Every structure is written in C-alpha cells, then in structure tokens.
Image (cartoon, rainbow, N blue to C red):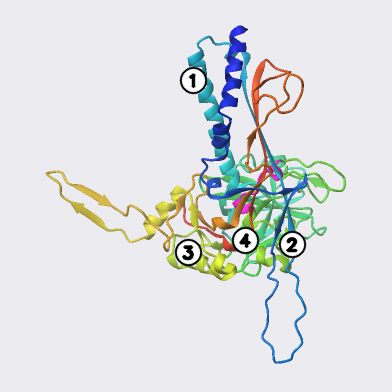
Amino acid sequence: MANMTFAASVVAELFERQFGNFINHLNYGMEVLDLFEMSKASFNGAYFEYPMTVKRAGHGRYQGEGANQPTPRSLNDEVVKFSVSEYIDKLGFTWRFLSQGNSSLLKSKIKRRINRAFEENREFLDQVSIFGNASRGLINERISPIVTANAAAPPAPVVAWSAPIVLDYSGDHSRFVGATLATVSSWVPVTLRCLDDYAAIENGHGITDAGAAGASHLFVTGSDELAGTLTMRLVSDNNGSTVLMDSTIIADGFAVNVELDDTTTVGAVPVGTPQFGRIDPVTGAPYPGDASYEMAGIFHNLFAGLWGDKDRSTAQYDSLRSTGLTMATTGTHLRTGFTAARVSHLIQTVKIAAGRAGQFSHILCNPLVITRLVAAVTVTLEFQTKGAAGTADLGPKTVSMLGFEPKECLNMPNGMIVGINKACWEILTVGGKMIDIIKRGDASGVIGGPLFKSSDVTTSSDTVFYGIHQLVCDRPNANGAICGIALV
C-alpha cells in the first residue's frame, strides 16, 4: 500500500507540474478545430448569447437640396442563443496499478496512458466538429414518388410502410449503424431538409398523408458506409401515403440535409428510437438519444433548420443559409466525377451570397476524394533514365481546385467537399479553453484542491476533464459544400 501511496502522489505531482502542457495537449492538435479561434463568450447558465447582425440595416441616401432628413435607423444587433455543449471525461488508475514498485517504469506507463487519453479525446472532438448534433450529412439523390402499402407485410406494430428507399449519402453513419429492417425499435427517425430553401420534407411538402395529417414519417432502416448509402422507409398510419423529392420539391443541383429528430410514434404506434434526445419544455419528459447534447458540427452550423434559436426556413433568416450543392445538376442527381465548372459554381455562388466575406480559406475533404480530383486533372507521364534501371513519375505531386489546395481531413465523409472561411468560425467557451482539468475538493472539501484525486467509491485515483463550449459559424453564407462525388 505504501507503493500505491507513493505512486499516487507522483501522479498528482505530475498533473500539477505539467498542468499547462496537459491543457494544451487537450485543446490543440486537431485537424479541424485547430483552424478556429477560441474565445470567452457571454454565458447565462443555459445558453451562449451571441450578438450579431442578421440583416443589413440599410445605408444613407442621395437627396435634393432642402429635403427632409431621413428617419433614424437602428443598428442594434440581434442576440442569438446557442445551446451549450457540456463535455466530460474521466481518466483513472486503479490502486493495484499504482502499487507497481519500479517508479521509473511506472512513470513511463502513466505518461503513455495520459497521452493516449489526450489523443482519443482530440480524435473524438474532431469527429464531432464535423457532424455533431442533429445534422449528420448530405444526400445528393432525389426521390421519385414512393407509396406506402402493407402488401409487403411490415413488421408489427407498423401499419403501413413504403418500399425501401436507398439514397446516396455523404455523412456520419455511427447513428445509423444499429438500424436493421427486422427490428422496428432500431429504426432511426430523420427529417430531410431541402437546401434550396431549407424547407423540411413533411406533410404538404414532399409527403402526402393518406391517413391523419402528420402521421407519416421517414425512418432510416439500414446503413452502408462503404457504399455511401442510407436505406429509408416512409412509415404511415394508412396505405397510400406518398413521399416525393423531385424537381417540384427541390431545385436542380441542390443537396438534402439529413437531421436526426425526436419522433417516437407514427399515429398512435410507437416506431423507432430517436438518436436526438431532448427534454420536452412543457412536460419535462426526457426523450432518448444524446446527439442533442453534442457540439454543433460543421454540417449543423451550415445546414440545420435551426441556427441557434433562429429558423432558417423562414424568409426573415434566409441570410443565415449556406450553399449545399450536388455535383450532378439534372435528373436524379446520381454520383458523378469532379467538374471544374461545378466547383467554380460553388465558389462563385458563395461569393455572391456573402459579399467580401465569401472567400474560402480552406476546402476540406476526405483523402479518398483527392484520388477523384487526381483522376479529373490532366496527368503527364514523365520518364527519366538514370543508369540502367531508370525511374518513372506518374501524376502530379500536388493537386488543387481552382487555386485551392484541398486540406485532407480523415473524419470528413467520402464523396463531398466543404469550403469554409475560417474567419467566420469561433469556438465559444466559458473560460477560454474547450476543456480543462478540474480541481476538485481537497481533504477539507474546499474546491480548488488536487487535479488528481483518490475516489471515495472505488479503489482508484482519477482526474476529470471537463468543458463547456460550442462551435459557431457566424456567417454560414460564406461557406458551402458539394456532395454526390463519385466514390473510389
């Protein structure tokens, strides 16, 4: 036990002496989040309050001699409320592990485990920074009319369902990987949002209910990450409901956002399990799922219906919309290869929408997308003889898209590119860092005690990583994406 006490004190001292280094290792070294600045934000205990200009307030005017002065106009900012994300991890060492005798070897083992914990947290945060919260990715493919019918004998308790709808999808699959056709409770309810006007696919817009109004909903019943597809079914309380997503519903060349939602029933029948949980503001009843607690990722900032507490599907907030396009521009928008014209269209469309701020600083993509870019450029075979053997070099060393060298992001989904202006992004925090190492009560119970502390419950000692933060893009219209790129 003496060895354990000595080792625990060594670890505690290590955390105290290396506190600054550990904080930096937790907060920096990420592919995506390192692009953005961290800042302290106004926090009221429930929301980050972010003042910003949503609509331009106007300008002066030219007028004739002796004319009346113009009416004063207000330049007040609109305060947007962003929900906070609360992040926690706990790193522990058992007393048995800390009882090892060789102090130098034990220090090496402890250091390796601490560095591994930092690396795993950074990797997870980088993933969430792309597809965190409700918006998980983009669909490029459009839907011809699909009708619900129970001739295919839907599993109980489903009343009516459509034939499977398999759609090209570039996004996160982790929330759908458990969905199987035979298990109704595993189906994941989603809302599809058309990115030409940010209107949802719902009753009256893409869905026509044959039964009670609003008693039809889309559920993901299967997922194939390698093929880049989601399989969905329209579930209804009656035969004859339809879903349609063609050029009458969404304009040519625009993508569709996939949002998790909290639907739990179709009509009176329980169906699926939501991955997007929340607390009902009226009843206080909890919904299952934890995606709602995640930091808002790039997809959510750019393409979700709600931006903070503002509804982007309304004309009042149309300036907060981004640009989500497909590589194909006609028909069903099936995946296709790169074209310079389409990438240029994204760049120029964003410039028009955002003005001087509409200049990408980076184009983010999965490394496999770069192989498609290489295939799209002209490749020259160069052969230079050196001695008897000689060497050959096939293909360019670097490739770019209209002057932008793509930034490889391992967590970015295959089949798409995302253009960002990093000046428009900010990581809102309470104390200036995304994550801190928490000082807990000392022996007298006073907060501000040790960073590394023995547990009162288990035979272990541990430290707590904790942070309150949110990722915010304050100019969504200065950013954009293209999906529907052919997979490798």
Q: Earlier in the sequence, mark 4 or mark 3?
A: 3
Q: Is residue 419 above or below residue 48?
A: below
Residue closest to the far left = 388
Seen from this angle, which residue lies furthest right?
283
Numbered tag placed on residue 475 in the rendering: 4
Q: CA distance from mark 3 to mark 2?
A: 33 Å
What is the span of residues highlighted in magenta in the rendered image?
290-300
- Compute the Cα span from label 4 to label 2: 14 Å
The residue at 23%/55% (across/down) is 382
Front-most of residues 278 and 185: 278
Q: Are marks 4 and 3 in contact (CB under 8 Å)?
A: no
User: Which is more toward the observer, 97 or 417?
Assistant: 97
Residue 95's place in the image compared with 401, above or below, is above
**Is tag 3's residue or tag 2's residue first in the polypeptide sequence?**
2
* Mark 1: secondary structure: helix
Going from N to C along the chain, the mark reached first, 4 or 1, is 1
Q: Residue furthest top?
A: 2
Quarter where residue 113 is shown? top right
Where is the N terminus found, in terms of image quarters?
A: top right
**Residue holding disc 3:** 343
Q: Nearer the viewer, mark 1 or mark 3?
A: 1
What is the spatial separation of the Cα atoms under label 4 and label 3, in whole angstroms? 20 Å
Residue 78: assigned label: 2
Residue 453 visible? The answer is yes
Pointer 1: what residue?
108
Q: Position of residue 59 (x, y in %)?
A: 67, 76
Callout 3 amino acid: Val
Q: Mark 2 or mark 4, which is nearer the start of the sequence? A: 2
For badge 4, the amino acid type reads Arg
